[in-house]
Image (spheres, rainbow, N blue to C red):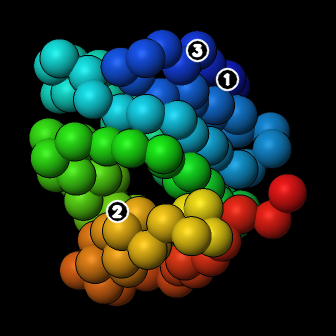
Amino acid sequence: MDRLLFEGTKMTPSIILDKDAGEFFISGTSRPENPMEFYKPIFEWLEAHFESNSSKTVLKVQLDYFNTSTSKILLDLFELFEAKAEDGQDVHVIWYFEEDDEEMQEAGEELLDLVSISYEVKAKDY
């Protein structure tokens, strides 16, 4: 599976997983009714990606809003990246936030501080 795309809705984020690009994007709003069910194919795709990939993997997260259930999913995602980094994979996460959105900035910092991976938390540059 080389590419996985989800169009964003009012409840779910846009997701682009493109193996050829080596950069993966999650953007928009994340408050799905069943987050485990929604994010399951993303985790499966990433597991398959990591099994067959040796180049750098960059995850770019640009959420405007996410609920508590999604915060647990995001932590699980970052823990997956941490495990792959421990296995020698080159991974990096970039958490984007609106320049005046201190809450989203702090959310990214708090989540990413819980794992040992290469990351950046930075304001969106338009």
Residue closest to the eye, 40 or 52: 40
Q: Earlier in the sequence, mark 2 or mark 3?
A: 3
Left/right placement of residue 50 relative to residue 22 reads: left
Q: CA distance from mark 1 to mark 3?
A: 13 Å
Disc 1 to disc 2: CB gap under 8 Å: no
Which residue shows up at 31% across the image and 43% down it?
66
**Could one spot residue 125 in this view of the protein?**
yes
Disc 2 to disc 3: CB gap under 8 Å: no
Helix, strand or loop for disc 1: strand
Circle 2 crowding by C-alpha within 10 Å: few under 14, some 14–19, many from 20: many
Residue closest to the eye, 105 or 70: 105
Q: CA distance from mark 1 to mark 2?
A: 20 Å
The disc labelled 2 sits on which kind of residue? Answer: Phe
Helix, strand or loop for disc 3: loop
Residue closest to the eye, 78 or 47: 78
Which residue shows up at 70% across the image and 34% down it?
18
**Could one spot residue 92 in this view of the protein?**
no
Circle 3 crowding by C-alpha within 10 Å: few under 14, some 14–19, many from 20: few
> To which residue does mark 2 refer?
78
